[in-house]
Image: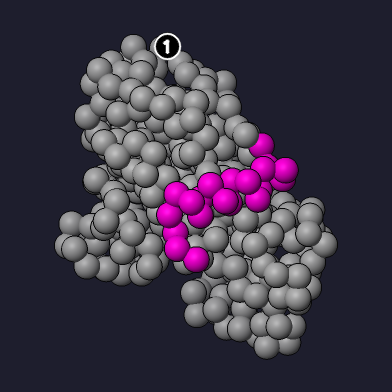
Amino acid sequence: MSLDLEAISGAHERIRPYIHRTPVLTSSRLDAARGASLFFKCENFQKIGAFKARGATNAVFALDDRTARRGVVAHSSGNHGAALARAAKLRGVPAHIVMPSNSAKVKVRAVETYGAHIVFCEPTEAARESACANVIAKTGATLIHSFENEDVMAGQGTAAVELLEEIPDLDVMMCPVGGGGLLCGTAIAAKSMRPKIKLIAVEPANADDAAQSFRAGRLIRTEKKFTIADGLRTNVGAPNFQIIQRYVDDIVTVSEEAIVSAMRTIWETMKIIVEPSAAVPYAAVAKGKIDIGGKRAGIILTGGNVDLDALPWNL
């Protein structure tokens, strides 16, 4: 498979029966505050509460029947696990989700809801990979990586397709970056549909490997520090970085305080729930990190899965 607009369009057709076409919301108050026209693609209203439903569903339904019957496996502390569990249930195949022992309870419950087999492990990358390898050895399940998988990337790119179908004259599009699955699909879709669009990624300053790599022109691995944006703590994938170098115009970073402030602003102003990772792009806009004055800017709000027992208003 070649990851291009044709592949993303194919993914869109494949997953259409199983996902929401999420709304694009606006806020005159935020437009006035920022001096721009902002269009929020609300993936917080997506199945499982996040954009991850798109990529996981595409990856599962792209498998041939023989392969699918053996099941799927992934390691995930968050939304990808729930998305894969749901997609597997829809197709009627087994799902094995490896989760670190310190996973948020809300994320564990989401995976359990769809009947997946959960394997808990130590919260290290090595432990996750080892647990996945054991599952594959025992079951023959197919690994569906949360971002280093072209079918996943193609599925994630469908959100940008929908946004540009609805608002075709955007000047700028923004999304957060962690591993890079969403960013890669978004960048290819956006640049293919509207070549002159500026594609900006945003990540926490406390987890800024993508920004460092982008500046250096080579992949840089960082020891992750704490960030409230738990969905963005992972290092960017190697294949993802190659796509990022080709299609992305800039990567900027934001502080923890900016993320919390942006999250609260979106909750209070737009009356919608977003998780910290989803607030990262607007945080960059609010702090003047991205020049959108007088422009039409699209922001992908990636999800709304928040542990209501631990609302993060105070750092």
Numbered disc 1: secondary structure: helix
Q: Residue at x 22, y 29 (%)?
A: 291
Q: Quadrant of residue 98?
A: bottom right
Q: Which quadrant is home to the C terminus? A: top left
Q: Quadrant of residue 199?
A: top left
Is residue 113 toward the left or the right of residue 263 in the image?
right
Magenta stretch encompasses residue 11:
yes
Q: Main secondary structure of the magenta part?
A: helix
Is residue 165 toward the left or the right of residue 31 in the image?
right
Q: How is the image coloured?
A: one colour
Closer to the camera, 3 or 307? 3
Whole-percent x and y of residue 231?
49, 52
Q: Residue at x 38, y 49 (%)?
A: 188
Task: Examine the rendered structure and indicate whether residue 234 appears above or below residue 8.
Answer: below
Q: Residue at x 48, y 39 (%)?
A: 161
Whole-percent x and y of residue 200?
30, 42
Whole-percent x and y of residue 24?
52, 25
Q: Amino acid at mark 1?
A: Ser
Task: Examine the rendered structure and indicate whether residue 102 appears above or below residue 193.
Answer: below
Q: Which residues are magenta?
A: 1-20
Q: Residues within 10 Å of mark 1 (few under 14, many from 20)?
A: few
Whole-percent x and y of residue 310?
59, 43
Q: Residue at x 39, y 22 (%)?
A: 38
- Residue at far bottom of view: 137
Closer to the camera, 82 or 268? 82
Is residue 16 toward the left or the right of residue 233 in the image?
right
Q: Which residue is mark 1?
A: 28
Task: Examine the rendered structure and indicate whether residue 297 appears above or below residue 237.
Answer: above
Magenta stretch encompasses residue 83:
no
- Residue at far front of view: 6
Is residue 314 toward the left or the right of residue 102 in the image?
left
